[in-house]
């Protein structure tokens, strides 16, 4: 199958070419027309669906650009106001119409004539939206959309001074790779002490988010926000009990490997005790990996790496570069983290990240690049709703790309020794991230099962969960204060609640694709592209099957995959 990155902006047939969203009165007539339109036959129904999809794409893209611009510059008040205006003045007015349109579709006699296979997941999502919709939740959701972004504004202002120079926390993290242990310890303390300065503000923000989310769930008739959110996220194929089994499997099958990794690190560094500021370090005579120096170099090397893997992958990044859909540098006033934002009309998504010249940045770029390829592959699908794929497959797209691309990492490293170190770093990360995923997920279950907790209870719960998944090697003594609020560095808790177990499930899927890749590269990449090009038109187990995988994150499956990664590491 030939895929193309020569993406074209969707032509408008329903919304005028020059239409721009400025206010609600300009937008409302489209919704009124769709709601009042007579539908007499199946062709008219499909035309109605396409017109509605086009309107959705126009609105989605507008909202995305408002968010992208604001995260790129959190100190620009005008950009923040444009985003807030959309959340408070436009989105809340769309929701009642969207609900009416959903009901019009589900209740229309001709809907039964639509191709059952083609529309199954689409209609399932529509029904789910109808079930969850409550008028009382509209103002709550508007407030939440704005409040969630405050995390980026607070974090974006955090800087520390090292050796007389100001750095963002992302930039300062590169000192944790410094061979000088004193510098590492000093910077570790500076970063964590800086985080503590905003501890109370972030605590207060989280309290408000929990309160509003809990109310949203109660309004919709759920016992707690967790159960509501599982439904909202479309988790049709697994339950909370599966998440609890995943937590136990991490303790059983992953923690022993984590201990081996950290024990080797301790021996390699020649240390009596391994401290948290030693994790990213190399022995004194070995320089930290420096895969690139500027963001221009990072994108050039990423394009070269992707192109060698499969030309289509490289073309996707080149297209985004040509469209200026990349903002990769870390700087003061920029929100933390990294993301790939699909753009419903343009087709070519936007990658945002905070690069500071580390190996970790290469992984982030390749990860977001995998998401970008997914956006390109799903873009040709007929309806906007067909492109709304589950996060459990979206993260397979990104994490499998990290692993498959390792074969072409000589674009980043000229020496074999550095290349080997980079691959070791990647595989160690594949394993050591699992306990953190389990911690964040388990913490969220506790938070929303106990929404009326105090700060003391929250801290106690966090510390106890962290201890459950703690390795036996790193010495954390004396760092209790820093560790007790370490959850505040995880933006998902603030911005996208309950979105974290997906990384664990998808990491297993990615390892499965990598196993295929080791046996037959072209076949594995064909399966990868085939699954991603289906967007959200199939169920999660069907999407995994298209990629040559079984949707399974049981303890037994985790053990098999961990054994495989351990074997690859030992090579």
Image (spheres, grey):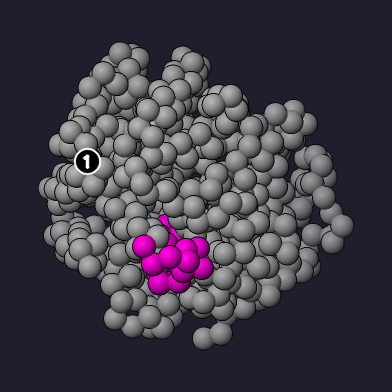
Q: Quadrant of the C terminus?
A: bottom left
Q: Which of the pair 526/554 is nearer the observer?
A: 526
Q: Is residue 475 above or below residue 538?
A: above
What's drawn in magenta, residue-wise? 393-417
178 on left or right of 445: right
| Quadrant of the image occupied by residue 247 | top left
Query: What residue appears at the point 74 percent right and 28 percent down from the top-left corner?
Result: 77
Instruction: Name the dominant secondary structure of the magenta segment.
Output: helix
- Please rate how many residues cluster around mark 1, counting C-alpha atoms within 10 Å: few if below 14, some from 14 to 19, many from 20: few
Residue 146 visible from this viewpoint: no
Left of 47 or right of it: where is 440? Answer: left
Residue 14, percent from left and from top:
78, 63
Q: Please give the name of the residue rendered at 47% of the width and 66% of the height, measured from the top-left corner.
A: 414
Q: Nearer the viewer, residue 569 or 273?
A: 273
Q: Is 397 in the magenta?
A: yes
Please name whichever residue, 424 or 311, is drawn nearer the observer in this view of the structure.
424
Pick the residue in front: 366 or 300.
300
Residue located at (39% from left, 63% from top): 419
Give the residue number, with chain letter if any, for mark 1.
Answer: 270
């Amino acid at each position: 199958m030939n895929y193309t990155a020569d993406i074209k902006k969707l032509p408008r047939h329903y919304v005028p070419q020059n239409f721009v969203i400025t206010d609600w009165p300009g937008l409302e007539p489209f919704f009124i027309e769709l709601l009042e339109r007579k539908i007499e036959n199946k062709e008219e129904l499909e035309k109605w669906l396409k017109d509605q999809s086009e309107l959705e794409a126009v609105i989605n893209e507008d909202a995305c650009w408002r968010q992208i611009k604001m995260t790129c510059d959190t100190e620009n008040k005008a950009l923040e106001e444009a985003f807030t205006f959309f959340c408070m003045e436009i989105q809340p007015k769309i929701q009642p119409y969207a609900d009416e349109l959903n009901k019009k579709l589900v209740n229309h006699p001709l809907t039964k004539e639509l191709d059952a296979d083609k529309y199954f997941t689409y209609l399932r999502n529509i029904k789910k939206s109808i079930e969850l919709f409550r008028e009382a939740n509209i103002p709550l959701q508007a407030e939440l959309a704005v409040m969630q972004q405050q995390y980026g504004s607070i974090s974006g202002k955090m800087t520390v001074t090292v050796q007389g120079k100001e750095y963002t926390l992302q930039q300062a993290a590169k000192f944790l790779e410094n061979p000088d242990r004193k510098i590492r310890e000093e910077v570790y303390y500076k970063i964590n002490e800086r985080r503590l300065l905003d501890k109370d503000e972030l605590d207060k923000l989280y309290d408000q988010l929990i309160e509003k989310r809990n109310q949203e769930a109660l309004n919709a008739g759920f016992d707690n926000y967790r159960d509501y959110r599982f439904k909202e996220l479309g988790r049709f194929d697994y339950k909370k009990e599966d998440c609890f089994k995943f937590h136990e499997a991490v303790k059983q099958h992953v923690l022993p490997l984590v201990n081996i990794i950290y024990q080797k690190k301790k021996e390699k560094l020649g240390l009596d005790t391994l401290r948290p500021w030693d994790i990213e370090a190399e022995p004194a005579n070995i320089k930290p990996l420096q895969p690139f120096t500027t963001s221009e170099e990072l994108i050039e090397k990423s394009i070269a790496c992707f192109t060698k893997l499969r030309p289509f992958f490289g073309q996707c990044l080149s297209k985004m570069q040509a469209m200026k859909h990349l903002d990769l540098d870390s700087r003061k006033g920029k929100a933390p983290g990294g993301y790939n934002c699909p753009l419903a009309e343009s087709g070519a998504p936007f990658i945002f990240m905070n690069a500071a010249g580390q190996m970790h940045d290469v992984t982030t770029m390749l990860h977001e690049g995998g998401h970008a390829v997914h956006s390109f592959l799903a873009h040709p699908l007929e309806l906007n709703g067909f492109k709304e794929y589950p996060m459990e497959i979206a993260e397979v797209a990104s994490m499998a790309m990290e692993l498959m691309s390792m074969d072409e990492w000589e674009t980043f490293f000229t020496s074999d020794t550095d290349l080997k170190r980079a691959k070791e770093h990647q595989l160690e990360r594949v394993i050591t991230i699992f306990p953190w995923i389990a911690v964040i997920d388990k913490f969220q279950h506790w938070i929303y099962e106990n929404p009326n907790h105090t700060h003391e209870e929250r801290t106690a719960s966090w510390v106890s969960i962290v201890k459950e998944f703690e390795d036996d090697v790193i010495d954390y003594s004396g760092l209790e204060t820093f560790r007790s609020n370490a959850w505040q560095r995880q933006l998902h808790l603030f911005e996208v609640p309950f979105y974290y177990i997906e990384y664990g499930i998808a990491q297993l899927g990615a390892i499965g694709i990598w196993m295929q890749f080791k046996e037959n590269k072209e076949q594995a990449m064909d399966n990868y592209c085939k699954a991603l090009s289906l967007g959200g038109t199939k169920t999660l187990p069907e999407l995994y099957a298209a990629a040559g995988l079984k949707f399974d994150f049981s303890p037994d499956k985790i053990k098999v995959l961990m054994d495989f990664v351990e074997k690859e590491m030992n090579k």
